[in-house]
Amino acid sequence: MREEKLHILLCEDDENLGMLLREYLQAKGLVTDLMTDGEKGLKAFQKSKYDICVLDVMMPKKDGFTLAQDIRAINSETPIIFLTAKNLKEDILNGFKIGADDYISKPFSMEELLFRIEAIIRRVKGKKTKEVTEYQIGKYLFDTQKQILSFDDQQTRLTTKECELLTLLCSHKNQILERNYTLMTIWEENTYFNARSMDVYITKLRKHLKDDETVQIMNIHGKGYKLVVPEPNN
């Protein structure tokens, strides 16, 4: 799957789930260390270098939020994904304030976790090389700096919110972009008003992209959205 294998720290106190996740990720070529409590997780992080941390929130000895804070004190750049049965607004906000890169509510599919890990790693690698300023969206060209969407000789200037939302969709193209993550990233709060506002902007973006039938923004029920674009080789 990759030339260099990623090294993942997985902290999950449910040993059965933890072992299933570890086996799945390792089968996909990811080196995965499983720790069953927060203290073991911290010791492992102090001894080894990890590309990403996947932390359960409810763990004995040291919960996932506390562990994430300890990890951030050691390394502020290592990506963190929270796994949790909690979906309260306060818990989600707390996770993102600590510096989470993503937040997955149980139950979830192992394939979804893999997709999210890969998406985060791509974003991290992209930031380390250069900032993406242009995206090809089917027949459209999207300039994130000028906030302009071009189709043939037509140009549409996007609002700041439209630009931020389309940029986020492009960075997750052909993948699910979770509603909560989007709201926290762009609106910084998951409220009814903000959720309705986001739906309005999604509708506006669909109208902007309507001239290319191969491009669509899909609603993924109970999850979020997916920007579907043709792959270059297809």
Image: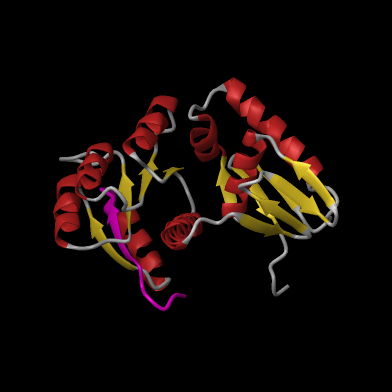
Q: Is residue 173 visible?
A: no
Magenta stretch in the rendered image: 1-15
Give me the residue at 51% from left, 27% from top: 190
Classify residue 186 by image quadrant.
top right
Horizontal and vertical percent position of residue 201:
69, 34
Q: Is residue 79 above or below residue 106?
A: below
Q: Is residue 227 visible?
A: yes
Give me the residue at 44% from left, 26% from top: 89
Classify residue 68 by image quadrant.
top left
Model colouring: secondary structure
Q: Is residue 183 above or below residue 138?
A: above
Magenta: main secondary structure: loop
Is residue 171 covered in magenta? no
Horizontal and vertical percent position of residue 158:
71, 39
| Of 182 and 87, the residue lying toward us | 182
**232 left or right, relative to 133:** right
Horizontal and vertical percent position of residue 218:
71, 47
What is the residue that sits farthest to the top in this orientation?
Answer: 193
Give me the residue at 31% from left, 40% from top: 57
Is residue 10 covered in magenta? yes
Give me the residue at 19% from left, 49% from top: 74
| Of 74 and 50, the residue lying toward us | 74
**8 left or right, relative to 61:** right
Horizontal and vertical percent position of residue 11:
27, 51
| Of 107 and 172, the residue lying toward us | 172
* Quarter containing the C terminus: bottom right
Classify residue 46 by image quadrant.
bottom left
